[in-house]
Every structure is written in C-alpha cells, then in structure tokens.
Image (tube, grey):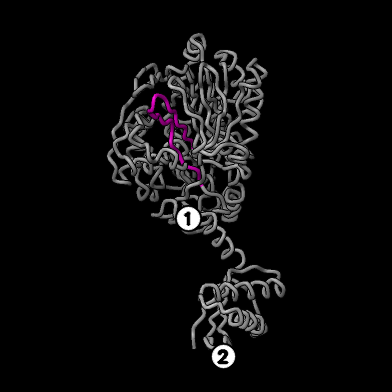
C-alpha cells in the first residue's frame, strides 16, 4: 500500500457459517495451508501464514491505523493467537516491502520470539531495523534481492522484483511439495519508474510456465480501469508549485515515499530552494534512504531547520509528515498553530500522497485550517500530484494472462476490491470456483494442486494503546466513545444499609453533559426506588446495587434529555 497504512471495511462477516480453529480438518502431509491474519476485507494489517510439514512461514506483518471511532488507539495489529503456541515452528518472516502496513507489526511479533529470521530487501530491512531500535530488539535478518532463491525449512522461496511506491519491493514465489504459490505483495507495472526498476514480468511468465497453483494478488486498485499512471508524470505539477509559489513550499508526504521525495528534492534544486526535513519519521527514513543510495541529495541542498529559517521565504522548502491529517504529525500541528513553523500568506502546501478512505474529514479539516492562515493548498483533488502504487484493472488482467494460475486468492483490499479482482481473474479464464474470496482468518488448503477454503481461525483486531497491547477492547472503546459524545455523570449516594434509604440528597457530578442547576434533583426519586428494590429483594452485593442505580439513572436521563451519558454510581454506607 502506497500509504503505508489504511482502512478497515466496517462489515467483515468474519467466520460466519464456518468452522472454528479447533474444528479444522487435518492438513495432509503434502498439503499447504494458507491463513491470512490480516489484509482481507481491509487495507492494512497485512499478514499471511503458510503452514507445511509442521513448519510455518509468515509473509508480512503490518499494522492498521485507527479510525475516528477507535479513540486512543495507536495502531491495530493482526491477531497472533492462532500461531502463538507454535512460534518455535516459524522458520522466517518474509517482508515484501517497507511500508507500515507490511512491517509495522513485526516488533510486536518479535517481542514474543526475538530470534525469528526476518527476510527482506536492503531498504526494507533498514527501515525495520530503525524501528526495532525503538523497541530495543536486535533482529536476526536475512537480506535478499530479486532473483535470489533461499530455503527456509520446507519452504523454497524465490524473490521477484516488483515496482511500487517505495523502492526494493519484492514478490515471493513459495515452492513446497503441495505446489507453487506466488504472492505479488503490493505492486504496479510502471513502465517508466524513477529508479528504472520495473516489475519483472519475465519472471512472472517463467513461473506461470512452471505452473502457479495459487496466485495471491494485490487488489487495492482492482476497481480502477486501465493502467496506473507513471510516477514521472507528476513532475510537471510539482515543478509548477516550486516555480509559482512566492513564499515557502511545504510538502507533506508519507515518510517512506522515497520516489516522491526525490521528485521534490529535484524541483527544489532546480528552483534554488534549500530543504529541511520535518518530523522524526521523515528525518529517520530519508537519512536511511540517502545513506543506502536510494535517495540522491545534492550536496548542500538539505540543511538544518534553524539554518533554513534565516533564508528568505522564496528560497525555502520543507518536507514533513501529516498528509493524512494525523493529529500529532507536523502538518496538523502547523494547521492548528501548535508548531514553530507558522504557515502564512504566500506559502503553498503540497499534499503529495493519496487520500486514504476514512481520513477524509481529518484531511479536509487540515486543508481548511491551512487555507485559513493564507496558504495555497495543492492536493490530489485539484492537481496531478499523486499516483497510486498499486496495479489497476488492466495491469491485473495482464498479469493473470501471463501467469495463468490454477487458483486465485485476491489479497490487500476491502470486500469490493477483492470481488473486483476475482472478477478480473475469472474474465481471463480462471475457473470461477477457483477464484477464492476469503476473509481475515480464512483457512485455504492447497492439496493436490487444488485450493479451497476449509475453515476459519481467530483473526480479530488487536489494539495497541500506548504501552498496552491487546488491553483495549471493543467494550472499552465503546466507553471512550460514550465519554466523548455523551459525557459522564457520577452519582454519590450515602445510604442507610439497614433501610436502603438515602440519608441525604445524592451528589451529582457531570462532565461533558449540559444541564441546568437543580435538574438532577428530579432523578432522586428514581434512584431511591432502585435502592428500595435492592433492599426488598435482599441484594447486598454492592456492585449489583450500583448496577440498579446506574440503570435507573440511565433511564431517567434518556427520558429527560434523549442522551446516553456514561453513568458511574458510587454507593457509600452511612
């Protein structure tokens, strides 16, 4: 995914009418089991487990970024529970590229077994190792490149160059006794890539001649007709921004989008502007990319932010994070006037990334605030400043015709993308019964060259909340949403334990709930009734009594105000 993160489709239907993990059929000795634990029905959280001969191979382990209805959540992980008691059987984690939705979950998996070999290209491993330093994990890494072929346990892996919105992307062909599986990773077929590294269709054709039994294919742009535009076609729009802006140029992009940053650096050089990187992840990743030779930075072009501030505005360019409206990212803080860089009249802000579905409100909020301070905001909606990193429908059809797989499993996409991808495969001649539309946790068994869905394993959302992994639940998120939307009312009741009567008027403490003085006094009879009921029925457990009071107050508030705040009763014996 070119965004390095993405959205989860709301209705997943996971596991309906299918077996639970304990009811899975026994995998035949020569069979291969494929279980996507993320990335199907959502864009993000990509992780697929391959099981053969009692051993496991993992391809990608990414994160999903939270939506507005998941307050307080930092990232969302795949559910490791199905493999947790078999981590000693994992021979390797293979990473297709360095975006967060493919590598972001690796630190959390390595916390549970740090010595799992991690396999990837040079840039991918460099990005991962920098991330792992923050988690104080030193990984066991295996660097590979296109055309390499390595064996991990019973898995014979061949790596194929693919073009994406980040350098060094790889597809992986996995050979076992069960057959040949080809996983594209995220890819497109840009024929004029900035780094000259095209998707290796000759390798795809060679694998097709060998016989691909199951083809896992990126679905993100399956609904988009034709072919994805080349990255090079963005240069005129970027150049125009640098040529026409009288003030500073502020570019916001994903911190891993090396190709786009290179275009911005080239434009800054051509128009006499010095550049500073803003944001920890941007500084870190671009430093890595430059050190490894993936980013060409002319000497003296990039300088320290403090040095940049001494230059006239028309000689300044800033490259920062925050293109998705993330509240703590540099661009959002500039928009909110919570950053040392103050956007002013004459500045141009260039949003050089895609607009991820689900982020629209946050992004347009940032655009509006930047416009309010006088900036000219250039984005995908009003200029040609972004192209996707994923293959469109024409490219997918091209690949199916080249590979001619026996079975297909669309991956990396919401339900509509998966369906559209399967339909393309069918139109190119794949048997409709062999175009499998799975979901997170679906179990696909490849036996005797035939792939079929045989069951389901747990694949829920695991929330990372600050230092806590898995502590936040749907129930706790519901409480957070209630606090944010409805407010909270705390009721302190001093009660005679013998009679169940209030010894004085309850104290009502309300936050985020609008009310007039004296309103809550009208609720006291309902609370007393609940306490009397508890006494008559012999309920002595304090939590049960508080629950009766909570229900009584909730009912009263809803009748009076048509609101449903969080009610917290506190019962104190007189």
- Judging by the rendered image, the residue that carries numbered circle 2 is 504
Look at the image and say whether residue 85 sits in the magenta stretch. Answer: no
- For the residue pair 335 and 244, the one nearer the viewer reads as 335
Left or right of 276 on screen, residue 450: right
Mark 1 residue element = loop
Left or right of 140 on screen, residue 281: right
Q: Position of residue 338 (x, y in %)?
A: 47, 59
| Segment tinted magenta in the rendering | 46-65
Residue at image position (65%, 78%) is 515
Quadrant in the rendering for residue 414: top right
Crowding around mark 2 (Cα neighbors within 10 Å: few <14, some 14 to 19, many 20+) is few
- For the residue pair 454 and 87, the one nearer the viewer reads as 454
Mark 2 residue element = loop
- For the residue pair 394 and 80, the one nearer the viewer reads as 80
> Can residue 263 be seen in this snapshot?
no
- Extreme residue in the top direction: 209
> Can residue 536 be seen in this snapshot?
yes
- For the residue pair 96 and 568, the one nearer the viewer reads as 568
Mark number for residue 472? 1
Residue at image position (50%, 29%) is 186
Crowding around mark 1 (Cα neighbors within 10 Å: few <14, some 14 to 19, many 20+) is some
Left or right of 358 on screen, residue 542: left
Q: Position of residue 223 (x, y in %)?
A: 65, 29
Residue at image position (55%, 52%) is 345
Real-space Cα distance between discs 2 and 1?
A: 38 Å
Mark number for residue 347? none
Count of residue discs: 2
21 relative to 531, above or below? above
Please report whichever mark, 2 or 1, sits nearer to the chain's N-terminal start.
1
């Amino acid at each position: 995914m070119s965004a390095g993160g993405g959205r989860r489709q709301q209705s997943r239907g996971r596991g309906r009418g299918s077996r639970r993990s304990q009811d899975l059929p026994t995998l035949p000795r020569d069979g291969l089991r494929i279980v996507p634990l993320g990335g199907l029905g959502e864009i993000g959280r990509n992780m697929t487990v391959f099981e053969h001969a009692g051993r496991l191979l993992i391809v990608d382990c990414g994160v999903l970024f939270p939506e507005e209805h998941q307050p307080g959540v930092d990232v969302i992980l795949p559910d490791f529970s199905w493999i947790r008691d078999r981590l000693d059987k994992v021979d390797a984690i293979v990473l297709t590229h360095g975006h967060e939705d493919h590598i972001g979950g690796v630190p959390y998996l390595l916390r549970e077994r740090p010595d799992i070999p991690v396999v990837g290209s040079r840039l991918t491993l460099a990005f991962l190792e920098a991330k792992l330093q923050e988690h104080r994990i030193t990984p066991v890494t295996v660097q590979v490149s296109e055309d390499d072929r390595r064996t991990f346990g019973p898995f014979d892996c061949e790596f194929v160059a693919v073009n994406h919105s980040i350098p060094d992307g790889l597809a992986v062909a996995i050979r076992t006794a069960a057959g040949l599986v080809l996983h594209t990773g995220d890819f497109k077929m840009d024929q004029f890539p900035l780094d000259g590294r095209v998707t290796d269709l000759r390798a795809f054709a060679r694998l097709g001649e060998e016989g691909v039994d199951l083809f896992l294919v990126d679905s993100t742009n399956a609904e988009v007709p034709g072919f994805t535009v080349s990255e090079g076609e963005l240069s005129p729009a970027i150049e125009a921004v640098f040529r026409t802006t009288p003030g500073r140029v502020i570019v916001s992009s994903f911190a891993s989008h090396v190709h786009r940053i290179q275009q911005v650096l080239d434009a800054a050089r051509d128009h006499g502007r010095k550049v500073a990187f803003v944001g920890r992840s941007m500084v870190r990743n671009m430093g890595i990319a430059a050190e490894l030779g993936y980013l060409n930075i002319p000497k003296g072009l990039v300088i320290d932010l403090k040095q940049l501030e001494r230059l006239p505005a028309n000689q300044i360019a800033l490259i920062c994070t925050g293109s998705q409206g993330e509240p703590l990212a540099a661009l959002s803080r500039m928009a909110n006037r919570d950053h040392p860089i103050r956007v002013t009249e004459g500045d141009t802000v260039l949003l050089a990334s895609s607009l991820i579905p689900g982020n629209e409100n946050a992004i347009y909020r940032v655009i509006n605030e930047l416009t309010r301070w006088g900036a000219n905001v250039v984005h995908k909606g009003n200029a040609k400043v972004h192209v996707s990193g994923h293959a469109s429908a024409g490219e997918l059809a091209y690949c199916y015709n080249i590979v001619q797989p026996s079975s297909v499993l669309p991956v990396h996409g919401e339900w509509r993308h998966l369906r559209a991808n399967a339909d393309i495969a069918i139109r190119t001649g794949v048997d409709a019964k062999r175009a499998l539309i799975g979901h997170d946790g679906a179990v696909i068994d490849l036996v005797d060259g035939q792939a079929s869905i045989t069951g389901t394993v747990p694949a829920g959302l695991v929330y990372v909340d600050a230092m806590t992994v898995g502590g936040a639940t749907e129930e706790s998120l519901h409480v957070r949403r209630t606090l944010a939307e409805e407010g909270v009312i705390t009721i302190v009741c001093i009660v005679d334990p013998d009679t169940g009567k209030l010894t004085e008027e309850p104290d009502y403490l309300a936050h985020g709930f609008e009310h007039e003085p004296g309103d809550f006094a009208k609720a006291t009879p309902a609370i007393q009734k609940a306490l009397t009921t508890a006494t008559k029925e012999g309920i002595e457990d304090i939590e049960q009594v508080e629950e009766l009071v909570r229900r009584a107050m909730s009912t009263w508030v809803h009748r009076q105000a048509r609101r449903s705040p969080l009610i917290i009763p506190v019962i104190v014996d007189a």
